[in-house]
């Protein structure tokens, strides 16, 4: 009976870790996608591009204008790339910690 509970706890922890890392990946994916769309000069009036930009703004609001470069492309890469990297590091770090604790 205790072995069964332990296995269920371990499986639950693995699922939780997978969810945490997946959320971090999706968040970073939106940020990186916006960087690519911006650098490739995608049509800003397109609904999809607007959605990605809005989502990236929402995810990276706390890092906006940390870097104020003259070159707009470099500014976008740094201001959206920093949150992407932090989300990946934190998300995967938390997931690894959850897996180790199980």
Image: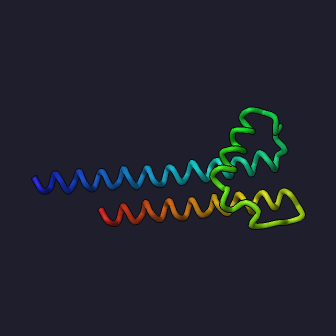
Q: Residue furthest left?
A: 1
The residue closer to the viewer here, 54 or 2, is: 54
The relative height of residue 56 versus residue 74 in the rendered view (above or below) is: above
Judged left or right of residue 8, residue 20 is right
Indicate how the structure is coloured in the image: rainbow
Judged left or right of residue 52, residue 95 is left
The residue closer to the viewer here, 31 or 7, is: 31
Expressed as whole percent of the image width and height from the top left, the position of residue 72 reads: 86, 57
How many numbered markers are drawn?
0
Q: Residue furthest top?
A: 47
Judged left or right of residue 24, residue 84 is right
Expressed as whole percent of the image width and height from the top left, the position of residue 8 reads: 23, 51
Which residue is depicted at the point 89% across and 64% down? 70
Which residue is depicted at the point 74% across and 38% down? 50
- In the rendered image, the quadrant that contains the C terminus is bottom left
Expressed as whole percent of the image width and height from the top left, the position of residue 23 reads: 51, 50
Which residue is depicted at the point 64% across and 47% down? 30
């Amino acid at each position: 009976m205790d072995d069964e509970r332990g296995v269920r706890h371990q499986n639950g922890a693995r699922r939780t870790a997978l969810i945490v890392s997946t959320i971090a990946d999706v968040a970073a994916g939106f940020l990186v996608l916006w960087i690519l769309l911006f650098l490739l000069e995608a049509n800003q009036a397109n609904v999809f591009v607007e959605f990605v930009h809005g989502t990236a703004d929402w995810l990276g609001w706390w890092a906006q204008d940390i870097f104020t470069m003259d070159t707009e492309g470099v500014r976008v890469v740094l201001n959206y790339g920093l949150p992407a990297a932090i989300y990946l590091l934190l998300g995967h770090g938390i997931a690894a910690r959850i897996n180790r604790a199980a």
